[in-house]
Amino acid sequence: MTEKRNLKLVVAEGLLSNMLFGTLFVWSVLRIPLLELFPTWNEGMLSLIFGIHNLFTCAGILLGGQLTKRLSTRRVYLLFTVLTVVGLAGFALLPVSNPGASYIMAMILFWFFAATGIGIGINVVQSTTIPWFPKHSGFISGALYMALGISSVILAALARALLPLIGVRLVMPVFAAIILAVSLLILADKESIKPPAEKATSKQELSGCRPSVMLRKPVFWLLIFWNISLRTSGLILLDHAASMAVAFGGMALVAMMIAPANGLGSLSVGFAMDKLGMRRTMKIDALLFFLAAVLLCAGTWLGRFGFILPGLLLGGFAYGGSSSSYAAAVKNQFGAKYYTQNFAVSNLAIGCAALLESGSGTVLDITGSYFSVMLMVAVLTILALILSILAGKRIK
């Protein structure tokens, strides 16, 4: 059983917090205005800043897991707020007269402050929200990831509206103000961002193994490599969806429907996991992504956008499902007692996937063909299918 707490409020605060974490995706909207403001910058420089931020987000998740051993989860959440607000607000200080210094500042602000802060926030919110719902871990995890996916679309639209009004350097500070206001609102609830108290939790819900034990279990490696395979595939789709759509006669905006498909997949597959268990979910999600890869390979080989669009949507759906079910599976498989630390370690998958995905651009440069990039997705999803079969009876 869990202690008396307004569980609707727990969910609301978790969803609201997760919607803040989509802030960094507004970078795609700022690319062209930044190039106009700093003509000596180029696309590669901007891609470097955004690409590497995934590694700092991963580092932030790991750091968040370590900090919760020593600090209250509310203090860790406050650290997320401070780091992210400083990182985003600092963009107002970029010196237009010195593009070189501005670029270095942008890297420091986006990586060390904003991305690291977001990673800390993701860890503390996920690991304190999901344990309140031991029987519905998949559904709650899915709802949190859906909020994150939806926020990237909403916040990007807001950034587009703000650009002509205040200019590119002041867009990020506006988001900093939003994060500060929402975070203070959440922290005003003195019981927010806290896991269930141990005294009010059953022995079963309190069970679990430490990260050092988790890392020695084969089931952990089956889960993480399965997730890396599908997460890398999802990042490849997100990276190339818009340009690939335009190359084959579609519209970039239509291709970006992958974002809401991702959110729907997070919720649907998370809910299905609660009913079917992780073993079946692993196989179903990997199979869905493989079917998406087949459609995308066919579309890029035949030059038919009619195959590419459903492939992107199905792939986005499966990508969302792999993220939400994975987070819930770590809690279900290894227990709630050390979930904050285990969640942090398990999200090394984010950094590994980011590094693997970065190779897709090189493949495209060498071959000049989107078919070769989508073939990467097919190979990765076949690997995920094999891993889901090998999981067998090891997965609960």
Image: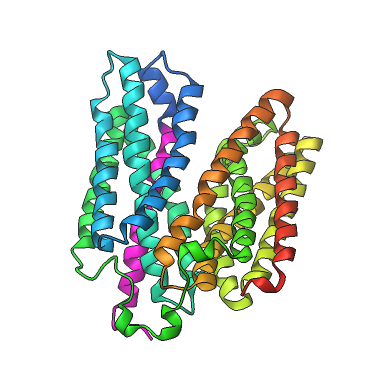
Q: Is residue 99 shown left or right of residue 246?
A: left
Q: Which residues are magenta?
A: 1-29
Residue placed most toward the observer, 333 or 133: 333
Instruction: Count the numbered circles shown.
Output: 0
Q: Work out which quarter of the rendered image holds the N terminus and state it.
A: bottom left
By secondary structure, the bulk of the magenta-drawn segment is best described as helix
Colour convention of the picture = rainbow
Quarter of the image that includes the C terminus: bottom right
Query: Is 278 drawn above or below residue 67 in the view shown?
Result: below
Q: Nearer the viewer, residue 86 or 243?
A: 86
142 shown above or below 57: below
- Residue 18 visible somewhere in the drawing: no
Q: Residue at x 19, y 68 (%)?
A: 190
Q: Residue at x 69, y 74 (%)?
A: 393
Q: Residue at x 38, y 75 (%)?
A: 132
Residue drawn 31% across and 64% down?
A: 13
Residue 206 position within the rendered picture, expressed as x and y whole percent measured from the top left = 41, 79
Name above or below for residue 248 compared with residue 20.
above
Image-based side of 193 in relation to 142, left or right: left
Say if the magenta span includes residue 307: no
Left or right of 356 in this view: 9 = left
- Residue 242 image position (x, y, % from top left): 59, 36
